[in-house]
Image: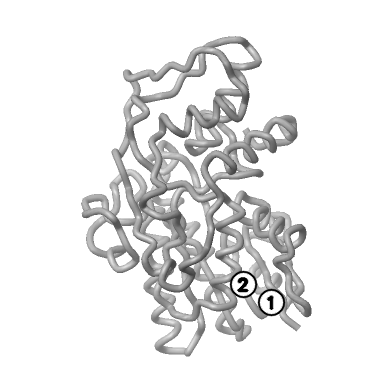
Amino acid sequence: MTVVMVTGGSGLVGQAIRMYVEEQGGKREGEEWVFLSSKDGDLRVRADTDAIFEKFKPTHVIHLAAKVGGLFANMAQKVEFYRENTLINDNIMECCRINKVEKLVSMLSTCIFPDKTSYPIDETMLHDGPPHPSNEGYAYAKRLIDTMNRAYAEEYGCNFTAIIPTNIYGPHDNFSIQNGHVIPGLIHKCYIAKKNNTPFTIWGSGTPLRQFIYSLNLAELSVWVMRDYHSPNPITLSVDESAEVSIKDVALAVAKAMKFEGEVVFDTSKADGQFKKTACNKKLRGLRPDYEFTSMEEGVQKSVDWFVENYEKARK
């Protein structure tokens, strides 16, 4: 019997994996899937984590749970972002070792890469320099997952690895305008602009470039990594470099999907952030050359439709 336990099961990626497994035929015969939320216990606490492993007896773990936050939270609480993530990750990894879990896949992020680097970034560059000072607490805690995946493999023969997605978006996201990520924030803003008949205002010039991955694509690829990618070295899960889009393109795609016909304004008094953070998906393409990603237009349309339908219960 295969029991796959997903930590952080109620978040953006956890919900996407649930949709992929339960609604899109991703589940295989003889598999049982368990999606944890904070109601199941506090992963910062070792006794709680032990009890969760004892209760569900997972054979495979996809580890998505983390303390996350926007720029200002990261700057204000570096100690908490470092300590809480380190505690969570240590408890999960050690419980996987003790309970002889066959495979552990943990999620990293492109924001933990060196601040000063050349582009495109790939998996080998993770430890080449310090991260951006604004999120160093979070970044160093996450980087240690990569270090420990190799250490557990060398010392105990554990099959632990990590995935590095680029910017994720989709249903069940956090659509907060203040603290959410780019696409969900734009969707919520555009919704309000349409409702109030006011301009749709985008912070910044709209020129920065980003790679966005639709959450259902990431879900499918994460399950594939669990089943078929066996190396402690991490793998970047990203659309191709040619699929990089400007924030302006994204904003216009959101307006189109929302059928917003008012004025679109770029507020250039607001900062743009990094111009680009291009990631290289050569390792993924070597293993999955024919994988087809959902287009930006289709993914944004699905995200907008979900938000409009679930406005009352969406996180915002």
Q: Quadrant of the C terminus?
A: top right
Is label 1 in contact with label 2 (beta carbons under 8 Å)? yes
Q: Secondary structure at mark 1?
A: loop
10 Å neighbourhood of mark 2: few (<14), some, or many (≥20)? Answer: many
Residue 313 in view, yes or no: yes
Amino acid at pointer 1: Pro
Residue 46 location in percent, x, y? 59, 69
- Is residue 91 positioned above or below 77 on the image? below
Q: Is residue 244 left or right of residue 2?
A: left
User: Between 1 and 253, which is closer to the camera in this rendering?
Assistant: 253
Report how far apart the C-alphas of labels 1 and 2 lie in the structure. 7 Å
In this rendered view, identify the residue nearer to me: 154 or 235: 235
Q: Position of residue 2 (x, y in %)?
A: 72, 80
Instruction: Inspect the image, locate mark 2, and give the three-letter code of the amino acid beneath it.
Output: Val
Q: In the visual, does 297 lie left or right of 172?
A: left
Q: Which mark is residue 61?
A: 2
Give residue 228's quadrant in the image. bottom right
Residue 55 visible from this viewpoint:
no
Task: Provide residue 253's location: percent of width, then percent of height.
Answer: 52, 31
Identity of the residue furthest to the top in this view: 197
